[in-house]
Amino acid sequence: MHPCAHRSETPRVLAPYVRIGVQAQTLFLGFGSIRQAINDRRLWKPLVQLAHHHMTPRTRSEALAFLTQSCGVDGSLADAVMLTLERDSYLISAHSYDPADRYSRHALFYELSGAQADQVQQRLSQARVLLLGCGGIGNLVAAALATAGVGELTLVDSDRVELSNLTRQFLFAEADIDLPKAEVLARELRRRDSTCRIRSITGEVTDEESLDALPEADLVLVSADSPGLTDLVNAHCVTSGRVWLNTCYVNDIAVWGPLVIPGVTGCWDCRTLTARPPTDEPELRELITRVNGRYQAPSNGPVDMLASSLAALDVLRHLGGFGEPASLNRRMGVWTHELALDEQPVERSPDCTACAGVRPAVHRLRGAR
Ligand SMILES: [Zn+2]
């Protein structure tokens, strides 16, 4: 049962994202995840009349009276019409949408996802995110989070802006070349949402100590490719009970996940997720290491945009408590050349050297459904 059903005598209005259309003898109520196909033609007219009636906030009693008295529909047909419109997220609280509010369009998205927008926004405003890596993916993830109303962002990067970054690190301009990336990104984010508390740290995370020295956060997002960083962050987060997410690209694949909720989901070490040089063939290992040593990633703006947007959406889902993160217990990839979705399962392993025996922190259970 949708939570709205419990508030039936609270006036509710037809959500602005509900559109109705007829295609191939079927009436569709809503599109996307809320789409209902109505084939029973007897429902069409009263359903559309009721949807129209709900363009003004109405209580359930008012809606039922309208159906029976004004439309002449009663009995099981009236029940069917009422139930059809009360499903999913077609009706929302009258105060859920204020077009003038800066987060109003996102509020509709949260309502569409079955959550109460004001509560989601409140949770986001209290959330703190630590971002390691302010490059192509970091730029866009940070912009998505800051402008969505995340309360606090700490940006960490040791690099300076270079000319070859500008194909994908879209918040940097030619005039920013040679400036520290974390500082420039902080400047750009402040211009976009002055309510977000933004800190920038120009430095490198190389060991447990440097991770410990960073500010507290509810979620650590890794969008950097320093060798060993994911293992380091995983060990740190699993031990300290912090949620973390990795996002990157692997050549033409846009990758995000797993969203690691210590003690609840699988972690980076529960499964072998990446291919490495063999440990039992020294000669081969040496050659592979030399070949891989000359690797230069074919970084591409649109691929970075894809990875960053899917990662940002999962971060918002987890922190805001709406929908379900797509990267729970799995590492996801979009193969951009083939347009195929790739999934590496990362279920929790009882034998994991990093997270076996770790218990969930109660306040972090949200999002792990
Ligand atoms: Zn594990």
Image: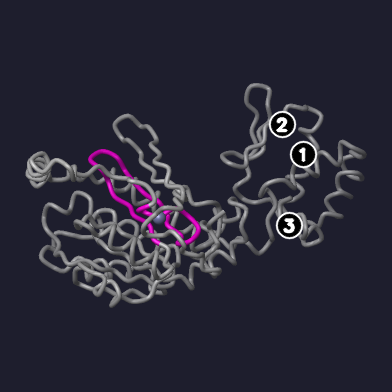
Residue drawn at 53 percent across, 56 percent down:
368
Q: Are marks 2 and 1 in contact (CB under 8 Å)?
A: yes
Q: Disc 3 or 2, which lies upstream in sequence?
A: 3
Q: Residues within 10 Å of mark 1 (few under 14, many from 20)?
A: many
Q: Which mark is residue 38?
A: 2
| Numbered range of the magenta stretch | 244-269
Secondary element type, mark 1: helix
Magenta-drawn stretch contains 256: yes
Q: Residues within 10 Å of mark 2 (few under 14, many from 20)?
A: some
Left or right side of 108 for 234: left
Left or right side of 218 for 211: left
Pointer 3 residue:
12
Q: Residues within 10 Å of mark 3 (few under 14, many from 20)?
A: many
Kindly identify the amino acid type of the residue bearing the numbered disc 3. Answer: Arg
Q: Nearer the viewer, residue 171 or 362?
A: 362
Kindly identify the amino acid type of the residue bearing the numbered disc 1. Answer: Leu
Q: Nearer the viewer, residue 66 or 195?
A: 195
